Image (spheres, rainbow, N blue to C red):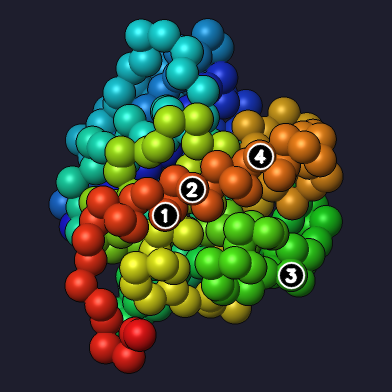
Amino acid sequence: MISVCLATCNGERHLRALLESVLGQLDPSDELVIADDCSTDGTLELINAYGDSRIRLLRGERRRGVVANFGRALAAARGDIVFLCDQDDVWLPNKRSVFLEALSDADLAVSDCQVTDASLNVIAPSFFVLRRSAPGVLRNLWRNSFLGCCMAFRRTVLVRALPFPDRLPMHDTWIGLIATATGRVRFVAEVTLLYRRHGANASPTGERSHFGVVERLMHRIRFASALCARLISLKLPQRPGQA
């Protein structure tokens, strides 16, 4: 069973294109878990109009922000394979098959994507090239390569990543670091997504950060300390070949 976890907040403008591209790749037994962060536009009405039994809508009672909202969706997921999903993007038809193949020998997979403008005109043909994406804990503490809308992972990663630590800067970086530190991660060169950037996205990933130097440094320290604490709490047995 696949769970797709989507966080929404006033996403009516681009949401229909995203939902059509996702639902077309889900089996009857799969689920799309949508956590809504108190939308005030037509987001909820659009979702409810589908009447699709695969959609599970979690309504927010108060505004929580993108990290906590994704946390709600992930905590409710029931699948063995979990996809992260943003409200602005479009899945390409190969997304499901590419990730299921990649996860046959990995715990978490990250695919490439094309960066587009609001009208889906391609700005950058490869996010991997734009971001200089690469695996590794230290590499991704310094320069994050884990883009949530291009990630899927096994339930074992979800169990280790939840609950999110307090004051977590971003959920996808955290999940990627957990998977890297405790399992096998694959970066897949195939493009599986149109990554829409329109100036009002919840995350500035791939663009110039709006955080100052000190704030960015504090984010790295927070990720590193939270990762160390989580690894200690997990008390995982050593994998073969580990010293």
Q: Amino acid at mark 2?
A: Ser
Label 3 vs label 2, nearer the camera: 2
Residue density around tag 1, few if under 14, some if 14–19, many if 20 or more, within 10 Å: few
Q: Residue at x 43, y 53 (%)?
A: 227
Count how many numbered circles sit on residues in the image: 4
Residue density around tag 3, few if under 14, some if 14–19, many if 20 or more, within 10 Å: few
CA gap, disc 1 and disc 2? 5 Å
Residue at image mark 1: 228
Mark earlier in primary sequence (3, 2):
3
Give the number of the disc on residue 218: 4
Q: Amino acid at mark 3?
A: Arg
CA gap, disc 3 and disc 2? 25 Å
Label 1 vs label 3, nearer the camera: 1
CA gap, disc 1 and disc 3? 25 Å
Mark earlier in primary sequence (4, 3):
3
In what element is the residue under mark 3?
Answer: loop
Residue at image mark 2: 225
In what element is the residue under mark 1?
Answer: helix
Q: Are marks 1 and 2 in contact (CB under 8 Å)?
A: yes
Q: Residue at x 26, y 88 (%)?
A: 240
Mark earlier in primary sequence (4, 1):
4
Residue 25, position as x, y percentages in the image: 36, 57
Residue 119, position as x, y percentages in the image: 76, 42
Q: Amino acid at mark 1?
A: Cys
Q: Nearer the viewer, residue 171 or 218?
A: 218
Q: Are marks 4 and 1 in contact (CB under 8 Å)?
A: no
Residue density around tag 4, few if under 14, some if 14–19, many if 20 or more, within 10 Å: few
Residue at image mark 3: 132
